[in-house]
Amino acid sequence: MIKPLTSLRFIFALMVFAAHCYVIDPHFSHFLYKEGFVGVSFFFVLSGFIIAYNYQRKFESKSISRREFWIARFARVYPLHIATLMLYPLVGGALLAMNWDTVLKLVSQLFLVHPFIPQTDYFFAFNSPSWSLGCEQLFYFLFPFLALWLNDTRKLFWILIATGLIVACGMYFTPEEQIRAYWYVNPLTRLPDFLVGMLLFKLYDKSTGNWSVNRATWFEIGAVALFIAFYYCGSAGVLPKVYRYSVYYWLPVSLLLYVFAMNKGMISRFLSNKYLVIGGDISYAMYLIHLFIIELYKSTGWNYPWQIVIPILLLITICCSLLSYRYFEKPVNKYIRMHLK
């Protein structure tokens, strides 16, 4: 575990939470909040880095099989996904109006193929954040093959450059009303984010990381400042939103991950705080649970000041995520891996 990166997961999960609070109060419609969708890009790049960090050498040395890897990822992703998928229709009353279209949506989301369907009522059906799990599922399926095929850093770099140019051109020619379906949620077009993370691991793995504390701290400050600058300019609309879904943030997110993966500076020490690390551990649950809690509050029709409501909803989300992580995700993960080994 690289503790600063785990803590960064918590920080970006908070950004995603804030990005969805506009459904409660117009205050969160401000561009600085709504740009929080960058958290998803961060998670995809981080996923590529961490998966390569944990498994690249194992696949190269053949010390792990594809089956073992897929079981491990299934045990991590699917239990909470299925639990929240079951919860949404029950609470939302969708089962009371069951029809063929609802069944198709449930089945597509159950198997995490719904982000491939370019219709909003499919890829955002029920627990809408689960669309990103469909992307992760594709990444995990392909990784054992990519780990061996793209084990050369130079090859991976040039493939990523070519892919980036193709993606940027495709984004330019896509009609405005279709960009979310084809460039935000589609697993195939989000795969380059994952490849960026894999390339980042290659660079990290070749680095000596022989930095002093002072030097590392300045690098960390610089990486944070660069990300904030990109974030502010992006949220102010410097570039069309379609580019900000992925390619625009590749550089600042990559530098952020690379510098903090070194775990050398004073900010890294702060991010290694055990409470922030726990926040990172529960970030997956936060991501899947938070919108459910926000929408549940919205459905009550209550209209309390956001200064009171948002902290309470965040606290409820964190508490539910802690309970989920400790008493559901970890035990079920262990059970599945033990019985499917």
Image (spheres, grey):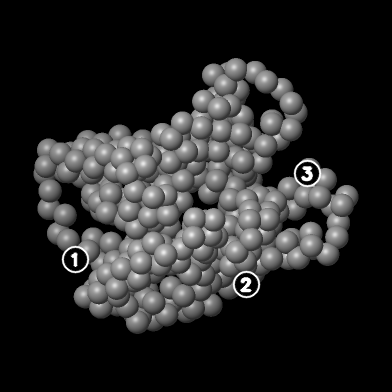
Contact between marks 1 and 2 (CB within 8 A): the answer is no
Q: Does residue 326 show up?
A: no
- Report the Cα–Cα distance between label 1 and label 2: 35 Å
> Label 3: which residue?
92
Q: Earlier in the sequence, mark 1 or mark 3?
A: 3
Relative side of 32 to 87, left or right:
left
In the image, what residue type sits under mark 2?
Answer: Leu
> Label 1: which residue?
206
- Report the Cα–Cα distance between label 2 and label 3: 33 Å
Viewer-nearest of labels 2 and 3? 3
Q: Does residue 264 show up?
A: yes
Relative side of 8 to 129, left or right:
left
Mark 1: secondary structure: helix
Query: Which sits in the foreground, 177 or 248?
Result: 177
Q: Earlier in the sequence, mark 1 or mark 2?
A: 1
Q: Which mark is residue 19?
A: none
Query: Residue 86: x percent and y percent?
Result: 75, 53
> Label 2: which residue?
340
In the image, what residue type sits under mark 1?
Answer: Lys
